[in-house]
Amino acid sequence: MTFHFKESLIKEEVKDDLLSRGYSRRQMMRTAMMFAGGAAALSVSGEAALAADDDAAKGMVRIGLNECWAGPMEPGLKAGMATLAQSNRYSPNGENEALVKTISAIENVPADHIAVYPGSGGILSRAIVAYCSPTKGMVMADPSYNNVLRAAKFIKAPIGLVALTSDYRHDVKAMLAANPNAGFYYVVNPNNPTGTMTPMAEIEWLVDNKPAGAIVLIDEAYSHWTTDYPNNTATHLVRAGKEVIIARTFSKIFGMAGARCGYMMAHPDVIKRVALFEGDRPSVATAACANASLTAKALMDSRRNELIANRSLTEDFLKKRGLRVIGPSHGNMVMVDWKTKTAKEMGEIYKARGVQIAADRWPVWPTVGRISIGSKQEMQAFIAASSKILT
Ligand SMILES: Cc1ncc(COP(=O)(O)O)c(C=O)c1O
């Protein structure tokens, strides 16, 4: 099927904005297609796209995509199902607005500083388009969450990849030096794939020293998993009116990756700018589920404790096998250096034993692979397979 996308479908203000920032007409059309669907969207839309390619994972131990081992929390499930039953209405009880209100109360950020999206991946790619162009670059750590890289490559923005420090923090000074005039600096905290944290003072340094008009996007997809949450988040920078975006997702601790829900917190002008290419909102059932999950603090605590136990089990096993484990990881993943084989080769070897791990996604570290932390049973299955593999 040929996909025809007409320039007349792009709003005049969007055209003006992109053309004035150095996009050619052709690049503008490509960018519009990125959000309009089709093959282009798949290349930038995140873990969800990787999962779409991944039918083979059915029936396997699925510890390759940083998903949660369990589904939505009980109160979320109950609220989501009740709303699904009323979803003959487009918005039975203002579910998306109610979700924003809850986020606002929990984060202590005004409601007009919050926007919900069907997953946080769409926030990241929209922010790239809003703040980068073929002449305005983006800077990120390497290894980090590569979807942002794909979006930047797609619009042909100059890219700065900066090695993590020797203790796996973002090297914020080197990031600024890599492109002192970038439009977008990306900090993932805790980082994916390493799970390691960058101290808040260093993120604040980047925010205070970046060029005016550029944005620092702090991706806190994994922050709920950390024991210091919420004291280690960057929400105060939004409150202080800094040029930052905080991105969060319900795909991780809340177990809602397939339900698609995420949100951004930023100044209202930034929210408007990112919404240049408008996106859909989460379905009402998803919004209701997310809303009821956010306040389930005791359930978050118990999931976090389960993660910590299962992560220790996995790390201890790998270390006893003499392998170098990157860390400390504060997220639901660990990286391990397989040393004698590439991550791609190890991915195939585990796959043959019915275990899906992340393979071949971070070329900067060819022999290092990522293992997502699943349930105790899943990690025991990983250990059993590893005992046969790592002889
Ligand atoms: C750091 C980071 N940000 C964003 C996302 C996107 O999550 P989603 O689009 O499911 O909200 C992911 C997914 O794994 C991630 O690891």
Image (cartoon, rainbow, N blue to C red):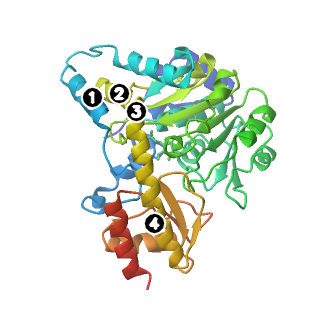
Percent coordinates x, y for residue 95 in the rendering: 34, 18
Percent coordinates x, y for residue 37 in the rendering: 40, 35
Residue drawn 66% across the image and 51% down it: 141
Identify the mark nearer the N-term, 2 or 3. Answer: 3
* Dot label at residue 292: 2
Q: CA distance from mark 4 to mark 1?
A: 33 Å
Identify the mark nearer the N-term, 4 or 2. Answer: 2
Residue drawn 30% across the image and 60% down it: 57
Q: Amino acid at mark 2?
A: Ala
User: Which residue in the structure is indicated by mark 1?
Assistant: 80
* Dot label at residue 314: 4
Identify the mark nearer the N-term, 1 or 3. Answer: 1
Residue 140: in sight, yes or no?
yes
Query: Could you say whether the residue bearing mark 2 is in a helix, strand or loop?
Result: helix
* Dot label at residue 261: 3
Q: Are marks 2 and 1 in contact (CB under 8 Å)?
A: yes
How packed is label 3: few (under 14 Cα within 10 Å), some, or many (20 or more)?
many
Q: Amino acid at mark 4?
A: Thr
Q: Is residue 304 above or below residue 361?
A: above
Identify the mark nearer the N-term, 2 or 1. Answer: 1
Query: Could you say whether the residue bearing mark 4 is in a helix, strand or loop?
Result: helix
Identify the mark nearer the N-term, 4 or 1. Answer: 1
Residue drawn 30% across the image and 69% down it: 354
How packed is label 1: few (under 14 Cα within 10 Å), some, or many (20 or more)?
many
Q: CA distance from mark 2 to mark 1?
A: 8 Å
Please identify the quadrant where the C terminus is shown.
bottom left
